[in-house]
Amino acid sequence: MRVLIISSEPLNPSNTLSSTFELTQAQVLSASYDVAILSVNLPDPLIVEIKLFIKKLIGLRSVSHISYISLWRSIWRTIFFLFFKNKFTREHTIEGIRVYEGVGYFFRGSTDFTVNLQRWLQTGAQAFETYSKKNGSPAVMHAHGRFLNAGVLARAIHKKNIIPYIYTEHCTYYQQGIAPPESKPLLAGVINKAAAFIVVSPSLKQQVEKFIGQKYERALVIPNVLDRIYENSPLTSSPGQDPFVFLTVALLDYKKGIDILLKAFKKAFTGNTKYQLKICGDGPLSHQLLVLRNELGLGNVVEFLGYQPKQSVKKLFDRANVFVLPSRVETFGVVIIEALSRGCPAISTRSGGPEYIIREDCGMIVEPGNVNELCSAMQDICNKRYDRLKIRDYAISHYGAGAFLAELAPVYEKIAGSGLRFEFIV
C-alpha cells in the first residue's frame, strides 16, 4: 500500500528537525508500507533575493573577502525565478525515506493568512503532481497539521483525485490562542472530510473542539511514536550520583520554559556543585538564556550544549539522572518518551501532553510556569529511586513502533480496504 505523508513543516537535508514527527512515523511505517513524504518550503521572497544581490554587487569592490560563488548563486537564482519558474519540486532521500519537497518563490512576502495559505497550496499541489507521476496515486494520504496547511492540501487533493486522507493534529496554536479566527471553517472542513481525525493527546482534542465549536466524539487519540534509535539500542551505561545531572533537550524558545528551569535550578541547588544542569538544543532565545544563566551565577554548573544529533542525545539520556521539560504549552512531548525509553525518569509540566505520559513510577508532574513547584520537584526527585529498566519497558510498550502500528495500521487498512471516499471517524 502506498502512503503519502504530508507535513505542514519544511523537510530537506538541511532541515530535518521541523518535520521530525513525520520523518519518524514514516520510518516506522516503511516496514509495512510504501511511504513517502511531501513537504513545502517557501524561502525568502524574491525581493529579498534581489536586495541581497544588489548588496553583494555594491560591496564587490570594497569587500575583499566577498564570496564569488555566493554572489553568482544569488544572481542565477534571481534571474531564474524572475523569468522562468518560481515553483518546483526537489527530491531527497532522508534517513531512508523519499521526500518530495515543493519549493515556491514569490516576489513579495505577505502577512495575510489567506495569501500565504494559497501560496503554500500552489507549491504543494505541484509537488503532489511530481510524486504522482513517479509513483502513481497513494492509497492513503496522512496529513499532519502544525498549523493546518497539510490538511487543506490533503482536502484539495481528495476533492480533485478522490484519494482518502487522515488528518493528525499536533499544533499548540489553540493553547496559545494564536490560531487565526478565519481558519475555523477551513479546519472544520478538513476534519469533517477526513476519513479519520487523530489527535496526539486528549487535551488537544478538547482544544480543537473549543476552537471550532464542534464535538468530535469519534476522534482517535494516537500518541506520537518513539524514534527507532532510542528503542532499538540497549541500555549500555548508568548515570553516576556525583555529579547528579539534570538534562533538558528542547528548542530554546519561550514555549519550552527554559527560563523557569534556570530559576528553579538556582533556587534548588545554590552553591552546591554536586548538581549540574545540561541544556541541549538551539533556538531564538539561546543568547538570552545564556545571559540569564550568567546573571544567576550558574556558569559553573549549567552547560549549554547547543544542537546535538540523535546519537549524541541518546548518550546524554543514558548518562543523565533526571530529564526535565518545563514547557508552558505542549500537545504531546516526544522528547519525554525518548528520555523514558532510555530509562531516565522525567519531570515535566501539566501543559497539555506530558501529564498523559509521565506516571508516578517514572517521574513527576508540576504546574507550568511555577518556579517554586519545579524547584521542590527537582529537590525531591534526587531522593527517589526509580527502576530504569521498568521505565524503559513502559515507554517502549506504550510508544514504541509496535504500539504505534497496532493503533494506526488498522485505520490505514480500513480506509484503503473499504475504498472509502468520505469520513467515517467524525
Image (cartoon, rainbow, N blue to C red):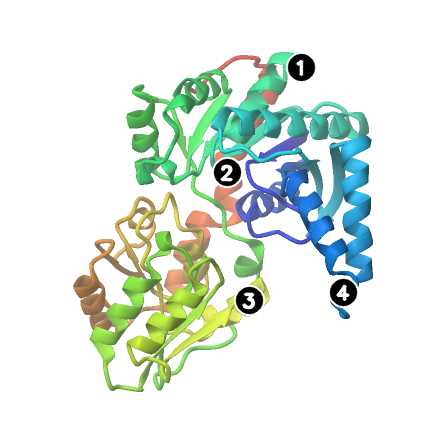
What kind of residue is marked 4?
Answer: Ile
Please state if 302 lies on the left or on the right of 315 as rendered: left
Please state if 202 lies on the left or on the right of 5 as rendered: left
Secondary structure category for the residue under label 4: loop
Q: Can residue 59 be seen in the rendering of this structure?
A: yes
What kind of residue is marked 2?
Answer: Ala
Estimate how packed mark 4 is, as few (under 14), some (14 to 19) or many (20 or more) residues with alpha carbons within 10 Å: some
Which one is in front in this view, the residue at disc 3 or the one at disc 4?
Answer: 4
Residue to which mark 3 is pinned: 308
Secondary structure category for the residue under label 1: helix
Q: CA distance from mark 2 to mark 4?
A: 56 Å
Q: CA distance from mark 1 to mark 2?
A: 29 Å
Which one is in front in this view, the residue at disc 4 or the one at disc 1?
Answer: 4
Q: Position of residue 156 (x, y in %)?
A: 59, 18
User: Which disc number belongs to residue 66?
Assistant: 4
Q: Position of residue 185 (x, y in %)?
A: 41, 17
Placement of 25 over or under 147, stated as above or below: below
Placement of 338 over or under 212, stated as above or below: below
Which one is in front in this view, the residue at disc 3 or the one at disc 2?
Answer: 3
- For residue 65, what is the image quadrant? bottom right
Which one is in front in this view, the residue at disc 1 or the one at disc 2?
Answer: 1
Residue to which mark 1 is pinned: 161
* Sequence-wise first label, 3 or 4: 4
Estimate how packed mark 1 is, as few (under 14), some (14 to 19) or many (20 or more) residues with alpha carbons within 10 Å: few
User: Which disc number belongs to residue 406?
Assistant: 2
Circles 1 and 2, Cβ within 8 Å, touching? The answer is no
Secondary structure category for the residue under label 3: loop
Quadrant of the image containing the C terminus: top left
Q: CA distance from mark 4 to mark 1?
A: 49 Å
- For residue 98, what is the image quadrant? top right
Q: CA distance from mark 3 to mark 4?
A: 31 Å
What kind of residue is marked 3?
Answer: Gln
